[in-house]
Amino acid sequence: MAYDPERPFQQFAGGFANRNYLLEIDGRRVVLRRPPSGELPKGAHDMAREHGILRALSPVFELAPASLHYCPDPSVIGAPFQLLEYREGLIPRGAELPSGLPAAAGEILGAGMIEVLAAIHAVDVDACGLGELGRPVGFLSRNIDGWRRRGRAAAVAGPQSLLVEEIAAWLDGQRFADRAPRLLHSDFKLDNLVLDPTTLGPRAVLDWDMGTRGDPIFDLATLLSYWTQADDPPGLVQGAMMPTAAPGFGSRRQAAERYAKITGCELDDLPGLYVLALLKLGVVFLQLHHQWLSGSVKSRRYALFGEQALDVLAHAHQLTRGRAL
């Protein structure tokens, strides 16, 4: 591969984590993907992991872009990086849908997200060489412990810290179904989909750096933790993760029921897994806020994550006391 450093490149907008740039190499458009600058949480933004997943997955799952090259040497551009196949299309970001979409956009997108997630969980990991990915044994208990630890590290003294401890303690006492492990994306949401601008059908699923094997209903719960509704607390809505609070989108419950209909999975323990997903989201917000407190980022939007984390964690805490999904 030959790259002309004199040619201009474009950084893709959006996101608070990995950096993505559109380059032209040997006359072909590719995406250079690298982790953010600064100290990174252990296991996060793993370019080597994502490269391995996509190398195995792209030949059998048409929505997975091919990973063309992985460079582990941070001296080249300042961090390990990948070169990925570029898939052109629409990526809706935040809580507002782009103008000019059909009136049924909410219904199409809501149903489409669930269908794609179910398709990810249906991948035969043994057939494509991902049968050893991750550590599915003890997956949920390890997630509870892991997000508790990350919350302790990121939370300042105050209500956020107490909420993390009480939510995690409640999760320790829950009984979750023992499901066969499936391929998980682990951060599946609307802005990780590339869409056909006309039909809104999926062209690609992006951001596989946290991919693993584990309980598929936790992957569903992660999606639902981004799936805001008009009656949600302000911090959840202001997170602006997806436009699902807008007219035309179904509720979280309707999304879960669609997933159950497609997959045949029982969802009796989904409320508890949704609490775990909210704990995860709240801690991620705390980590982003911690970057602002430490001075490693200067953008004022990171300053808002402390209050948003408090709202998300308080919402999760209410759910431990019997509030409906």
Image (cartoon, rainbow, N blue to C red):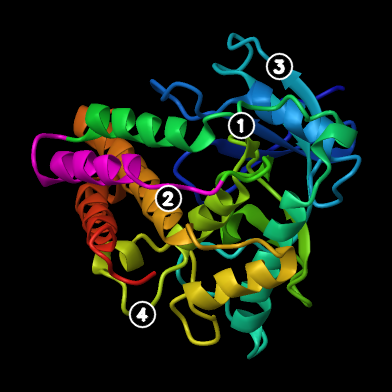
Mark 4 is on which residue type?
Ala
Q: Quadrant of the N terminus?
A: top right
Please report contact status of discs 3 and 2: CB closer than 8 Å, yes or no: no
Report the mark closest to the observer, 3 or 4: 4
Residue sitting at 53 percent across and 33 percent down?
A: 139
Q: Position of residue 49 (x, y in %)?
A: 66, 25
What separation in Å lies between label 3 and label 1 (alpha carbons)? 28 Å
Q: Which residues are magenta?
A: 156-177
Between discs 3 and 4, the one toward the N terminus: 3
**Mark 1 falls on what kind of element?**
loop
Residue sitting at 39 percent across and 30 percent down?
A: 146
Q: Relative to the observer, which residue lies in front, 76 or 127?
A: 127
In the rendered structure, the answer to whether residue 8 lies left or right of residue 243 reads right
Between discs 4 and 2, the one toward the N terminus: 4
Q: Which residue is mark 2?
A: 277
What separation in Å lies between label 4 and label 2 (alpha carbons)? 19 Å
Does the stretch in magenta take in 170?
Answer: yes
Q: Determine whether 40 is above or below 273 in the image.
A: above
Between discs 1 and 4, the one toward the N terminus: 1
Please report contact status of discs 1 and 4: CB closer than 8 Å, yes or no: no
Q: Which residue is mark 3?
A: 71
Q: Quadrant of the C terminus?
A: bottom left
**Mark 4 falls on what kind of element?**
loop
Which residue is outermost to the left?
A: 158
Residue 136 has which mark?
1
